[in-house]
Amino acid sequence: MKETSKVEINLREDAVIVVKNGVPEVIPKPDSGFGETSIMWQRGKIHTTKISYTMK
């Protein structure tokens, strides 16, 4: 049987949460409020997270 654990998250806040190696990580929003978050996978695991933003 796999080991499980529980974590509380705020469902009223827009966020991207990535669980990597059993640890949840909130991916920060672009500072300008406009942008893109890209997650690259390699062999079924998260390899890289890229955040780009646009200034308006």
Image (cartoon, rainbow, N blue to C red):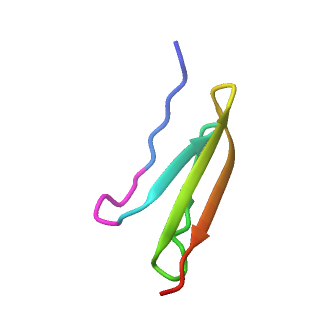
- Residue situated in front as seen by the camera: 45 or 8: 45
- Rendered view: 27 above or below 2: below
**Who's the residue at 42% across and 61% down the image?**
15
- Asked whether 11 falls inside the magenta stretch, the response is yes
Is residue 51 visible to us here?
A: yes
Query: Taking 46 as reference, is 33 above or below it?
Result: below
| Residue 33 horizontal/vertical position (percent) | 45, 79
In the image, 5 versus 49, the foreground residue is 49
Residue 50 magenta: no
Residue at the extreme left: 12
- The number of numbered badges drawn on the structure is 0
Hey, which quadrant is residue 21 in on the image?
Answer: top right
Residue range corresponding to the magenta coloring: 8-13
Does any portion of residue 25 appear in the rendered image?
A: no
User: Looking at this rendering, what residue extends furthest in the top direction?
Assistant: 1
Rendered location of residue 45, percent (x, y): 65, 32
**Going 51% across and 83% down the picture, which residue do you hit?**
32
Outermost residue, bottom side: 56
Q: Residue, x 61% and y 64% (percent of image)?
A: 51
In the picture, measured across the screen, residue 39 lies left or right of residue 33, that is right
Q: What residue is shown at x 34% (from left), y 66% (from top)?
A: 13
In the image, taking residue 8 as reference, residue 30 lies left or right, namely right
Horizontal side, residue 49 vs residue 2: left or right: right
Query: Quadrant of the rendered structure where residue 52 is?
Result: bottom right
Main SS class of the magenta portion in the image: loop
